[in-house]
Amino acid sequence: MHRLRADPPHVLNLSLGCHTFDDQPSRLVADAVGSLESTVTVACAGNTASDRPFWPAALPSVVGVGALDAAQEHRAPFSAHGPWVDAWARGEWLTSTFLEFGEFEGFASWSGTSFAAALVSGAFAASPAVRDVADLPDSRQIPGLGVVVHST
């Protein structure tokens, strides 16, 4: 955290998170993320198909990202959802490199909100002047869902 505060990145992707027993954020995590005022912090909403807060994505200072289906029209069935989810991006059947047992094996298709969060983080990184997800290029609204960050 000391290094992050001394030399803050423009974007911090947190493809991680958890629920808490009382659905309240960890004060330690909230304070750490909150101290990065000049950084756009993006976190995955979780693959829980639930509306329970998933931390740190549900923090007000974090862009919480849910997953869309491959057509980018509907929420993926596994994606967490709720008023704390700020943005949506494709999270089904994304192809990426795949390592198995330390040797390069090629590529695999994956699904999850971590991949959707990475796409939103990339959109912020490509648009350094933008701080609000609704202002990202190629973003649009889906009624009943919210801001969708389009990916190709």
Image (tube, rainbow, N blue to C red):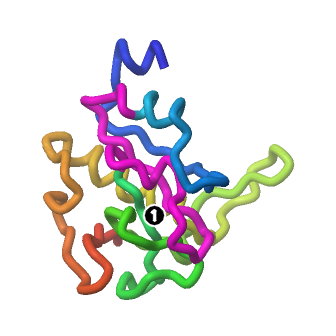
146 and 99: which is toward the camera = 146
**Residue placed at 13% from the left, 41% from the top?**
129
* Residue 32 in magenta stretch: no
Specify the quadrant that holds the C terminus.
bottom left
Residue wearing tag 1: 116
Q: Within the image, what quadrant is residue 120 found in?
A: bottom left
Looking at the image, which residue is at 45% across and 53% down? 57
Residue count near mark 1 (Cα–Cα under 10 Å), binned few <14, some 14–19, many ≥20 = many
Which residue, as the protein is rendered here, is positioned at the far right?
A: 101
**What is the magenta range?**
34-62
- Write the residue at 37% across / 82% down: 72
Q: Is residue 41 magenta?
A: yes
Q: Residue at x 45, y 44 (%)?
A: 13
| For residue 80, side relative to residue 140 (left or right) | right
Give the main secondary structure, helix, strand or loop, of the magenta stretch: loop
* Image vertical order of residue 38 relative to residue 57, above or below: above
Residue occupying the far front of the picture: 22
